[in-house]
Amino acid sequence: MMDLRSDDKGVGGEEGAPLVHCKIFLFSFVFSGFLPRSVRNWIWSTRVGKSDSKDQKERDPQLALKFGPFYSIKLKQALSTPTPKWYKQNHTVTTPIKTLNSKLSGYMRNGLVKEAHKLFDEMPRRNTVTWNAMIRGCFQNGQINQAVHLFRQMPARDIFSYNTVICGFMHCGDVATAEDVFDHMPFRDVVTWNTMISGYIRNELIHEAFRVFHTMPEKDVVSWNLVIGGLLKSEKIDFARRLFYEMTTRDAASWTIIISGLVGAGHISEARELFEQMPVKGVRAWSTIIVGYVQHGDIENAELLFRRMPDQDLYSANALISGLMDNKRVSDAVNLFFEMPNKCQKLWNSLLLGLIRHGLVEEAHALSAKSPFSDFVSSTNMIVGYFGISEVEVAVKIFELMPIRDTTVWNATIFGLGENDSGEDGLKLFIRMRELGQCPDEATFTSVLTICSNLSTLHLGKQTHAHVIRMGFEYCTAVSNALVTLYARCGNMDSALREFTSMPIHDVISWNSIICGFAHQGDGEKALEMFKRMILTDVHPNHITFVGVLSACSHAGLVDQGKFYFDCMRYRYLIQPTTEHYTCVVDMLGRHGSIGEAVALLDQMRADAIEVPASVWGALLGACRMYNNVEVGERAGERVLEIEPHNSGVYLILAEIFMSHRRISDAQRILLRMKEKGVKKQPGCSWIEVNDRGHLFLAGDSSHPEFGSIRALLDLVHLEIEMSIANKKSCQEIELLLDGGYCK
C-alpha cells in the first residue's frame, strides 16, 4: 500500500515558487486594465512613485489595508526587477489558466504525457483543477507512482482530488490503497461513496460494494444503478430485480441497466415488459431490446421494434442487418440499409461483410461497385471474400486496382495467397511490400513465416527471422509461434526448442507447435515430455494438442500410453474426438499389429452414429498392407473407394496386397477398374533447397540438369548400404559360430 502523506514543499514543489507567482499576479492585475484608471494611478503614486501622502491613505483606508507594506515592497521589487527571459518567451504567462488546464487535460486524454508534464512545469500559476487534471491523467496513462507523487505535493486538496485518487487506485486494482485514502478523507460526498462502489464492482468484490451501499449516509440514483449493475454482472438476477423495484427514483440508465441484465440472462419477455413500462425510452434502451431479440433469434420482433424506434441508430441497424443475414433474409438486409435515412461507410462495410460471410461474394462485389459508400475497407473485405472461395486471380486483381493500400490490405493478400497454395506469390508480394516502403507488422511476419514453413524454405525463413529481430517483433507470441512451427517443419528441432524456450509467454498454440513438431520428427518421447510440462501450466490442451500427442504415441509405438491419452482427452478434458484423433489411434493400433482392435474401434464409431471418414479407413488399409491382412485390407480399401473413387493410391495398395497373396485375378480386376474410371497415378514429388535454390523432383522424370550425377551418387549410396548389410550379416554369423564353439 502506498504512503500518501504530503511533502513539506510549497506550491508546485519548487522553492520560492509562491513569491514569483505573487509578483506576476500583482503586476498583471494592477496594470492589465481590470482596475479603474483612478485606482491604478493612486496605487502608482502611493506605492511606487515618490508621493507618500497620509491624506491619500485616509481617503481610502481599505486600499491602504489591502496593499500594506508587505505587498508594497513585493510589488516594488516586481516592478524594479528586469523582466526574466523565460517570461518573455513563454506564452503560458499570458494564457488564462482555464485554457491551460483544458490543454493539459487534452494532452493526457490523447496519451501525450511528456507534453502534459512540460506544460505543467511551465505554468506560472496552478490551481486545484490543474493538479487534479495531472493526477487523473497520470492514472489514465498508467503512471501510478507519478500520480501519487503529485498527490503528495498538492498544496491544497478538494473533494475531487480524493475521488480522483480513489478511482485511479481502483482502476489499477490496488483496492487496499483506495480504501486507505477513503478512510483518511477529511470529508466525503456521494461521489466518493459511489466511486468506492464502482471500484469494488470493477474488482469483482460485489459483497464489499453492497456493504458500502448500505453504509453510505445518502444514496442517489447512481448508487442504485451501480449496485444493480454489479449484481447483474455477478448473475444475481433476483437480487438485482428486487433492488430495482425498491428504487424510489429511477432514471433512463436504471431502466436500461435492468433491461440489459434481463436480456443477457435470457429473460427477454420480462425485459420487453419493463421496456414498455419505461416513461421515457432513450436510444440505448431501444438498442438494448432490439439487439436482445436479434441475439435470441427473434428477428420479427426485432424488426417491428426497429420500425417503431423514433431515432434509428447505426448500432441497432447493424445488429438487425446481421440478424437478417443470419436468417438468410439477404434482400431484406440490403433493403434495410438503403431505407436508412442516415447511412455511413461503417454500416455499408458491415452489410458487405455479412454478404461475404454467407458466401455471396460476387453479389457483394456487384453492390460495392455501384455504391458511393465503398472505400478501401470494402475492397479489403472483397479480397478476403474472394480468397475464401479460392478465386485467387479476382482477389489479386482487386488488390492491384486499389489506389491506396494500407498494411491490412497487404496482410490480407499475403495471407490469402498462402492459404490458397500460392505461397511463392505471397513471398514475392512481401518482397514487393518492403521495396515500396510499406512497414510490415506482427500479422505480416506471421503470414510470411507460415508460408515459409508450408514450403519448407528454411533459408528464407531464417532471413525473415532476422528481419523480425530488427523490427522488434521477436517477443510477439504469434510471431514466435510461427517461428517454432517453421523450424519444426523444416526438421531443425534444436532451433524450434530454442525459440520456444526464449518466449516470455506460451499460449496453447505455442505448446501445440512444439509438441506436434517433435511428433512429426518421430521423437515421441520428447513430445510427451513437452505435453507433461504443458499440463503443469495454466494452459489447457485442445483438440490439436491431442492430435500431436496421439501421433507421437503412434510413431513411438507407445500403444498403452496412446489409449490412456485418448481416454483422458474424452473423459477428463471433455474433448470430442475428431477425424484426426481416430486416424491417429487406428494408425497406432495398426502399426502395433492390433488390427482386430482397430476394426473394433471403427465398428464402435459406426454404432455411435459417427461417420468413419476415408482417412481412418486409409490408416487401417496401411496397417493391413504392413501385416499382409488381405481380408481386412480389402474391406478398408473398398470403403475408401466408396468415399474417394479417384484415389489412385488405394487402387495400387489393394493390387499390391492381392499380388502378395497370389490373387492375381483380383489384382487385375482392381487395376482394370482404376483404368475404367480414368484414374491415373499421381507421380511422387519431392523438393530440396540447396544454396538458396529450390530443386524439384518428380517420379519417372529425368529432366533435371544434374540427373546423371545424382543417379550415380544414389547408386553409390545404395551399394554402400548393401555392403553394410552384408558385412553386418557376416559379423553376426561369425559371432554365432564363435558362441557355438565356446558352448562346446
Image: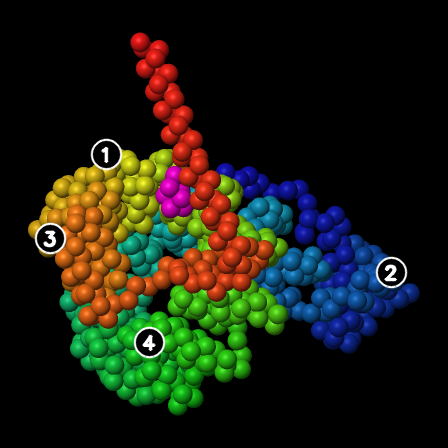
Give the amino acid at mark 1.
Asp
> For the residues marked 4 and 1, what is the alpha-carbon distance in whole angstroms?
47 Å
Which residue corresponds to mark 2?
Answer: 81
> For the residues marked 2 and 3, what is the alpha-carbon distance in whole angstroms?
100 Å
Q: Residue furthest left?
A: 607
Magenta residues span: 517-523
Judge whether 112 appears above or below 341 on screen: above
> Do the residues bearing badges 1 and 3 touch, measured as CB atoms within 8 Å?
no
Residue at (78, 75) in percent of width and height: 38
Q: Earlier in the sequence, mark 2 or mark 4?
A: 2
User: How many C-alpha atoms fall within 10 Å of the one at disc 2: few (<14), some, or many (≥20)?
Assistant: few
**Depth order, front residue of 692/372:** 692
> For the residues marked 1 and 3, what is the alpha-carbon distance in whole angstroms?
23 Å
Give the amino acid at mark 4.
Ile
Which residue corresponds to mark 3?
Answer: 606
Residue 740 drawn at (x, y percent): 32, 15
Give the amino acid at mark 3.
Arg
Which residue corresponds to mark 1?
Answer: 560
